């Protein structure tokens, strides 16, 4: 569908020469790929050089290739009339809608936009919309966009995002070709050399040339003889011979014009088009970025400056820098939205030129958060007695303290209850606090769950999350307790991903290897197993003896080696069992008012099973651990003291 | 050499005419020299022997003026085709943005064409350049000779141009195909501009 197009003005009827080759090549590209090649295409040239022919040819060709496309040709004058009519009738919306309805919009002679600010605004809207929607816009003017006086700067920028091509004054060969074609169309014939003679005259535009041709044709028609080249030359230059004397100089030969092909000119035109296409691709890309990011509410001043600059900036680097800044702003805005949704609306998060300011705001907000729970000071690596079964885990813990986030991340300490995982976890945390001066978050999985539930209830998940994400290292005890808790696992997974990506240390404990935890998501288990899984096994006899001796010294100030040997002989699956047995001996000795000894231990531990009073136990493993600050609920359950002993104690 | 310098807004293309001895590389440059307006071309430097064989190289600088704000320059070089000038060929090839392989269409010159093409690949490899990544066009020169003496365009394509690069039939003495070849390689080179800085 075409509107306002003269079907006679096509590429086939266009004479192409060096003066218009670039413009015609660009026009063909646009007609064959509307919205893709150059958008907008601006064709400039003085009056009468064929701008209207080229722009109309675009429309006809586009319509020929895509008959369903809507092609509209309009002169600025017509556009102005329609605009005024719509304003006076209050139908501006209708005007806009009509103007935006075409797939290819051709606007001729836009030099008349000068002093028409309102129409410039309308045109700016149209150019922006067409570029955004990939529809083709072609404009013509009597000079390049930059030379159009009093043109709106934004409109000029938009026009500069496309390609501007110029049609020049036709050179001799083109003039001759135009004359030959028109002569043929008119059914006229001239003697050899006449048209060449006419073509020698350097006209200002094609219209002038056609006017001269008309004169020559008319002169010959009223003459008795055929016009000679010399007579034609004289006629063209104004020194016209009298009618009927057309053949006066028929004997004067005309030097044939050298049919020199302008190969270099053709080459230059092609190269110019290619370079323009490549260079303008950048402008187009930057223009699109401006459009996309400004629509998303971002300040694009930096990119706009890039379009205006003529030298000094590598666009690839500048564009990459802009995109990087936007990515960072998006992350900061997300973080801020979690902490304070209102503050996240600050325009600073949408201005790449204010990235540092945005970083400062988020940092300040985070610094006001309550610090995460840290490791218990009572635990240290020095008080952790290592044996063969814990050697690897202790080595890994030391490595983590020395190089947090670098060697084993995450570190997963695995072992049955009571083998010292919690101790080692807190010890690593303390080590990182002291050695690396890091902010260490250390808590049990149970606390993690409870805090998250509370945060969800109070709609403070963002703040809760930020509290842990601010930490430099994260320690979680008994990770197996989050099995089958999808939301908790999701939060933990995100936390682990963040920490691993940023090289921040993670340490967790579990009673079994991550992949063996029932109800633990595959992603999470995989993430945990991707670090180092270090096992802590049951204490061997040497370790049991060392534990007993250390605690005897600590509790009663004695180092009864015989008692230590005796207790070390008792099988125990965990350190906690060893300590529980020792605690029974110490309590028994205290009850009868004697020092702990092998005899007391034997009396308590080797009593016939039948006479032994029943033991009440909250959980199988467990004896009070004489150390403060253990948060895990599991650790707070213990075997009750032998009731018989308690009765004796009461009787006394 | 940088093809595009955004800071100084310059585009400089170095195009090397490569091929066996007597295939017509220098003739290409002479033809271009004659057709370029004086103000657009620099002095053509030719170091040749008394028998007109290129001893060192030919150099023709072209100033295309400002295009889209970029001062655009082309530098056309030829290499000496004779086998014993390989060091010179390598030197000229250094930093090339595009190569025109000028093949001699005469049937009896096919082996020389193949040897020269292999030499081009080897020399590029020494600079760490894979010929597949280098803008390359073929020019089958001397197509003006009697048909019984020359291989046809298609035959030469089959024998030499197995990567399907653009190829042009030419007769450099008369100028046929000379500018088409130059345009072909120039467009390949310039299109890399957007590939190197993907849009």
Image: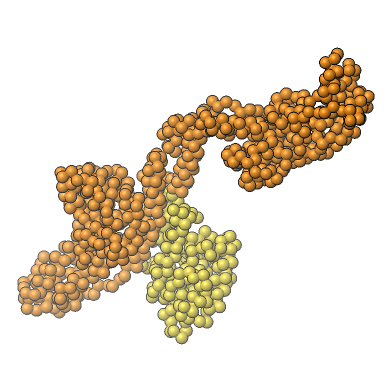
Q: Nearer the viewer, residue A626 or B88?
A: A626
Q: Nearer the viewer, residue A242 or B193?
A: B193
Residue found 66% across the figure and 32% down from its top: A444
Viewer-nearest residue: B68 or A23? A23
**Which residue is depicted at the point 40% across and 40% down?**
A298
- Chain letter, colour yellow in render: B
Quarter residue A227 falls in? bottom left
Lateral position of residue A146 relative to residue A322, left or right: left
Looking at the picture, how far across and down is residue A214, in whole percent? 12, 68
Residue A246, horizontal then vertical, whole percent: 9, 75
Task: Judge whether B159 appears above or below A123 on screen.
Answer: below
Q: From the viewer's perspective, tell me whether residue A180 is left or right of residue A272.
A: left
Q: Position of residue A153 (x, y in %)?
A: 29, 43
Q: Is residue A515 left or right of residue A258?
A: right
Would you identify the image quadrant in which residue A353 lies?
A: top left
Visible residue check, residue A404: no
The chain whose colour is orange is A
């Amino acid at each position: 569908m075409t509107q306002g197009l003269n079907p006679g003005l096509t590429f086939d009827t266009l004479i192409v020469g060096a003066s218009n080759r670039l413009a015609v090549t660009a026009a063909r590209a646009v007609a064959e790929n509307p919205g893709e090649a150059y958008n907008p295409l601006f064709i400039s040239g003085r009056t009468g050089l064929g701008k209207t022919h080229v722009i109309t040819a675009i429309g006809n060709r586009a319509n020929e290739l895509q008959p369903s496309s809507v092609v509209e040709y309009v002169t600025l004058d017509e556009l102005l009339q329609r605009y005024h009519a719509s304003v006076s009738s209050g139908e501006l919306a209708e005007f806009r809608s009509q103007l935006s309805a075409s797939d290819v919009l051709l606007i001729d002679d836009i030099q008349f936009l000068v002093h028409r600010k309102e129409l410039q605004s309308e045109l700016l809207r149209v150019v922006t919309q067409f570029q955004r929607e990939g529809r083709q816009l072609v404009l013509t003017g009597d000079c390049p966009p930059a030379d159009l006086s009093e043109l709106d700067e934004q409109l000029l920028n938009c026009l500069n995002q496309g390609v501007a091509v110029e049609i020049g004054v036709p050179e001799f060969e083109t003039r001759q070709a135009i004359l030959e074609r028109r002569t043929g169309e008119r059914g006229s014939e001239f003697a050899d050399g006449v048209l060449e003679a006419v073509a020698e005259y350097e006209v200002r535009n094609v219209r002038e040339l056609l006017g001269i041709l008309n004169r020559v044709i008319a002169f010959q028609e009223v003459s008795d003889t055929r016009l000679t080249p010399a007579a034609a030359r004289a006629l063209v230059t104004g020194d016209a011979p009298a009618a009927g004397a057309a053949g006066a100089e028929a004997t004067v030969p005309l030097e044939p014009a050298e049919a020199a092909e302008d190969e270099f000119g053709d080459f230059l035109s092609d190269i110019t088009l290619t370079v323009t296409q490549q260079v303008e691709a950048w402008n187009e890309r930057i223009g699109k970025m401006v459009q996309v990011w400004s629509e998303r509410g971002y300040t694009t001043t930096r990119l706009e400056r890039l379009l205006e600059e003529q030298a000094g900036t590598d666009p690839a680097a500048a564009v990459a820098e802009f995109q990087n800044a936007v990515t960072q702003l998006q992350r900061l805005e997300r973080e801020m939205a979690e902490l304070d949704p209102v503050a996240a609306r600050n325009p600073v998060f949408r201005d790449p030129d204010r990235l540092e300011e945005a970083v400062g705001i988020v940092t300040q907000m985070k610094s006001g958060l309550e610090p995460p729970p840290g490791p218990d000071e009572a635990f240290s690596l020095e008080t952790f007695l290592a044996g063969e079964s814990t050697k690897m885990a202790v080595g890994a813990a030391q490595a983590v303290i020395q190089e947090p986030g670098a060697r084993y991340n995450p570190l997963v300490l695995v072992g049955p209850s009571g083998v010292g995982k919690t101790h080692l976890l807190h010890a690593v945390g303390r080590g990182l606090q002291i050695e690396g001066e890091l902010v260490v978050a250390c808590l049990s999985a149970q606390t993690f769950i409870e805090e998250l539930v509370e945060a969800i209830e109070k709609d403070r998940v963002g703040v809760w999350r930020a509290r842990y994400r601010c930490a430099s290292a994260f320690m979680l005890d008994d990770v197996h307790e989050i099995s089958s808790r999808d939301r908790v696992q999701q939060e933990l997974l995100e936390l682990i991903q963040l920490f691993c990506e940023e090289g921040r240390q993670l340490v967790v404990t579990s009673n079994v290897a991550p992949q063996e935890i029932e109800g633990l998501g595959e992603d999470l288990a995989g993430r945990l197993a991707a670090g180092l899984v270090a096992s802590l096994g049951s204490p061997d006899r040497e370790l049991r003896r060392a534990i007993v001796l250390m605690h005897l010294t600590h509790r009663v100030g004695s180092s009864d080696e015989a008692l230590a040997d005796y207790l070390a002989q008792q099988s125990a699956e965990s350190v906690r069992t060893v300590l529980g047995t020792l605690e029974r001996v110490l309590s028994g000795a205290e009850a009868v008012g004697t020092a702990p000894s092998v005899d007391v231990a034997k009396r308590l531990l080797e009593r016939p099973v039948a006479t032994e009073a029943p033991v009440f136990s909250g959980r199988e493993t467990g004896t009070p651990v004489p150390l403060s600050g253990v948060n895990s609920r599991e650790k707070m359950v213990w075997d009750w003291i032998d009731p018989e002993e308690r009765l004796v104690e009461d009787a006394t | 050499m940088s093809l595009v310098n955004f800071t100084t807004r310059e585009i400089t293309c170095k195009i090397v005419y490569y091929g066996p001895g007597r295939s017509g590389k220098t003739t290409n440059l002479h033809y271009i020299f004659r057709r370029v307006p004086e103000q657009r071309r620099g002095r053509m430097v030719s170091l040749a022997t008394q028998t007109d064989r290129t001893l060192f190289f030919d150099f023709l600088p072209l100033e295309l003026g400002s295009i889209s704000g970029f001062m655009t320059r082309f530098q056309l070089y030829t290499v000496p085709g004779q086998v014993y000038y390989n060091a010179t060929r390598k030197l000229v090839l250094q930093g090339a943005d595009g190569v025109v392989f000028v093949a001699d269409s005469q049937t009896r010159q096919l082996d020389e064409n193949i040897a020269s093409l292999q030499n081009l690949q080897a020399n590029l490899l020494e600079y760490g350049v894979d010929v597949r990544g280098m803008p390359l066009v073929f020019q089958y020169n001397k197509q003006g000779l009697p048909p019984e003496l020359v291989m046809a365009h298609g035959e030469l394509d089959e024998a030499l141009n197995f990567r399907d690069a653009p190829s042009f039939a030419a007769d450099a003495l008369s100028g046929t195909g000379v500018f088409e070849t130059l345009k072909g390689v120039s467009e390949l080179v310039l299109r890399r501009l957007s590939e190197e800085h993907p849009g």
